[in-house]
Each structure stands twice: as structure tokens, then as C-alpha cells.
Image (cartoon, helix red, strand yellow):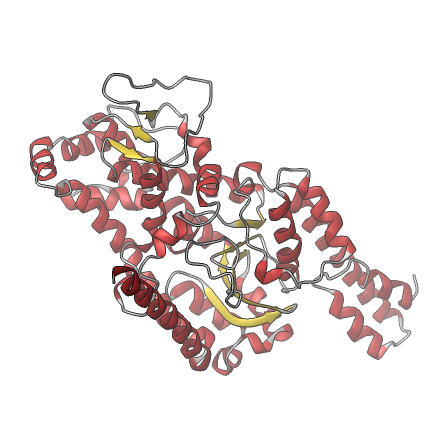
Amino acid sequence: MTYHGAKMLVAGPSRLPFQHLALRLDARAPACSAEACRCLHSAGKATFAARRALRIDRQDPPSYRRLNSSVSTTSALDLPVDGARRRVGAEAKEEGRSEEEQRAYDRLRPIIDALPGPVDWAVAYGSGVRHQANTDPTGPPPMTDFLLSTPDLAQFHTANLRQNPSHYPLTARLLGGGRIAWLTDRWGAGVWYVTMVKIRGLEVKYGVISTERLKRDLEGWETLYVAGRLHKPVLPLITPPEISESLRTNLHSALTLSLLLLPPTFTEQALWTQIAGISYAGDPRMSVPGAEHPDKVANIVKGKGALEGMRGLYGQFMGRGELALVWDRGEKRVEEPEVGKGWTWRGTGEEVLRQPDTSDHLASLIMSLPCNLRTRILRTYHAETDPGIVRTNTVEGTPSSASPERNLLLDIVGRKAISEAESAKGQVGDWRKVVLTEVANIIRRPALTQSFKGLFTAGFRKSFVYAMAKFRKWLNARRAKGGKAA
């Protein structure tokens, strides 16, 4: 094959990470066999990347992809979408995306494709993608947030520094990709955020985490930093099979924790509020004036299409026998779950759900929590608890009733006299306070460290501008509240 033939192969698939190779080769254009060999090698890599992107696209699991149809595309309408990406989008549409989700996918997926290096998993999230109750349709479009994972942080940052040096402050550019990867993995929640940058005409913020660290957080709630953000509806862009089960485990854990903290009867809306609030427990931003919107959780669950979005995420678990959830129709009649018939949603969030008010049920819920949280709960009551008795949680079931861990948990939640006495006074049961405290302890330190790390990853100027934007949102919310109160 000639040098120019090889060059055409390199430039073949539109907008691939290796397209810049063709430009560099064209500038030199030496007709030597060694250069042609390098072109062929690059062409092979480009072809492999194209096939991998298409394969991953087709493997997005429907259970995680089928979210609500309220995806906001306001901030992404002007993005160009080439013919190749439209073909990929057409294939994805056949797998269950709504038309609005499909438009958002077609416009946001190329943002990830524009980044160099290997990417295993990616989502778009936040108010730039999902409508929230406080979204101002007349205001400027919010920044679009992305999260992505890579199998090799050093390789990703090295390539990104070369292609997008403006995404990094001077101090980070001086460190290089290897040291950036080292700092990312050992400081905070393992995420490196690049904020307030333009990619294909869209202002974005994207966070990069290693795939190994992502799976640890999803399955074991190591920091709840990324896992907590995925408790709410997001727009999946790349979801390989090896991460699908971790995502499902994370959702199941969020549901069981929320049921654990809720009373025997509660509304569907209360369930979604409890789930959406998990990631903000212990987050320092929620207690610092101006750092975050005071009604952040309420805005998420009351946003346009939020109800359908939460149902889309958690409906896969609602009919399962171990949760023992039923629709409550009053004291005279409670609907029993129909085993094998699936779950049917009712109303628009105001309907009441009921769960068993027994120690055995509560112990079963705790047994379904991630092992990190279970260990913390057990050690609060039994300081000498052997970590070996805490089994790794799974979605499919819980340990047998004879396990040492379950016996300890039954002893904890069986302190009914204390819990009922406190509940009668309008207080939370003692062991529920412990659970909330331990969730906050998991979140607090990584979230605080991650906030300080943002000064380094974004640079002081961008950090100041970003903080001022947050402060203005907080101030406007306070003024709006004051106006309503008056």
C-alpha cells in the first residue's frame, strides 16, 4: 500500500481520536517505507477504535438507558452532528431511547469522542442535561457536566495534555500525565475535573476517574462521590457490559438504604427525595452559605420529567420479593404484591407505599447495603467486629438467616423499645441516626478534599469564576424564598 493510501485509512472514520495523525503526516509527506508502515499501524488503531465505539454503543443496557424523556438539549442544540454519528445514533434509537434522549445523545456523544485516550464509560449529568425545578428557560444555558472512566489515567492525561493543553492549568501541565494520574488516584475521590472549557462550541465540565476506582465506588460506596451522582437520572453515553452490573448494584443499594431510613408507610415522592438526598449527606457544600443551592434535592426530584426518570431507574427492583413493597390502600385493604407479575406504577407520586415494620425486614435491608457502610454500622455497636463476617453485597440476595453478621444486625435493629419511644417524640430511631452519620462520614472527607483539589485542577481563576456563579445561584434562591415568604 502507498503512503497516501495509508494516510486515507488514518483519516477514514470521521472524528476519531487518531484523526490528528493524518494532519501531521500530511505536513511531512515523505514517501519512505518506514513512514508508510507507521501509517498502516495508525490506520489499524483507528479502525479498531471505530469498531470498539460502535460495539460499545450497541451494548448500552436498556435498564440503565431507558430513563425519562425530559432530557434538556437547550445547551447542546448548536453542536454539529456528522453523518457517521447519525448512523450510530439511529442504531441506538432502535434500542429504546426516546426522541429527545436521542437528540441529546447524538449531540453529546461526540464531545466524548473528541477527547483522546481510551474511554470505557461516560455519562452526561446535571442541570445542563436534566431539567430541574429551578431551571430558568430565559437564562443562559447551564454548563454541561460529564463523567467518564478510563482504564489508564496516565495514558489519558498524557494524550489530553498533548491535544488539549488549555484544559489544564500551568501547574498541571508542568507535572505531566503520570503525576496527574498519581495525584488523582490518591487525593480526594479519585476524580480529576476539567471545568469551563469549550469542546465543539459547547461549554463543558468533565471529570475523569479510573475504571477500577469507578467500580469500587459503585459496588462498595468507597466515597459515594461518583456513585451518589448516579443515584439520579443521567444520560448514558458509553456503558460497557462489565460496568452495567456495578451500576445496577449501586442503584439497588441506594433504594435499600432509602427504605431503611423511611417509616413503614411513605409516599412515592418521599422515596425519590430520600434517594436523591443520599449523596448530599455530609457534603460540606450543603452547609457553606453560597456553595450550593439550598433546595438542591427538591429541585432535582420536582424537575420536569424527574418522576419518570426515577421510575425508569428503580422500577427494575420494585417488584422484588426481598423488598416486600406494596401499595397501601388504607387500613382496611393493602394490596399484596403479585409475584412474577412485575410492578405497576400508580398516580403521580402522591400514592402511599408500605413496607414491613419488623426487625427481620430491617436487618435484610442492611444486609443489602455495600460492605463499607455495613462494617461502619456494625463497628459503631460492636467495636471488635471482625471484617471477615461482612460479606460483599449483591443485588440477587442476602446471606442466610444464620450468618453471624445478620445476628448482630438483628440485635441492633431489635432495640425496638428505644426506637419506638424516640419515634413517638418525633425523633429518628437511634440506629437510623447511626446509619445517617456513617453515610455522612463516607462522603464528608472525600468531598472536602475534592473541593480543595478543584483549586488545583481548574486553576485559581476558573475556580473563582465557578464559585461566584454558584454563589449567585444561591443568592437568587434566597431572594426568591424571601419574596415568597413576604
Q: Report x, y in % for residue 293.
A: 35, 62
Of residues 388 and 68, the one drawn nearer to the viewer in this rendering:
68
Q: Is residue 322 left or right of residue 128?
A: left
Q: Is residue 163 left or right of residue 476?
A: right
Q: Report x, y in % for residue 102.
A: 64, 47
Q: Is residue 64 left or right of residue 463?
A: right
Q: Report x, y in % for residue 210.
A: 49, 57
Query: The C terminus is located in which quarter?
Result: bottom left
In which quadrant of the rendered view does residue 157 lie?
bottom right
Q: Residue drawn at (78%, 55%), measured in percent from left and top?
A: 83
Of residues 165 and 476, the one drawn nearer to the viewer in this rendering:
476
In the displayed orientation, state which residue is furthest to the front. 486
Q: Is residue 369 visible?
A: no
| Above-or-below relation of 454 to 323 | below
Q: Report x, y in % for residue 324.
A: 32, 24
Query: The N terminus is located in which quarter?
Result: bottom right
Q: Residue drawn at (41%, 79%), measured in percent from left and top?
A: 464
| Above-or-below relation of 88 to 312 | below
In which quadrant of the rendered view does residue 327 lie?
top left
Q: Residue drawn at (53%, 47%), measured in percent from left and top?
A: 70
Q: Is residue 193 visible?
A: yes
Question: What is the tally of numbered marks visible in this picture?
Answer: 0
Q: Residue drawn at (14%, 32%), measured in percent from left and top?
A: 411
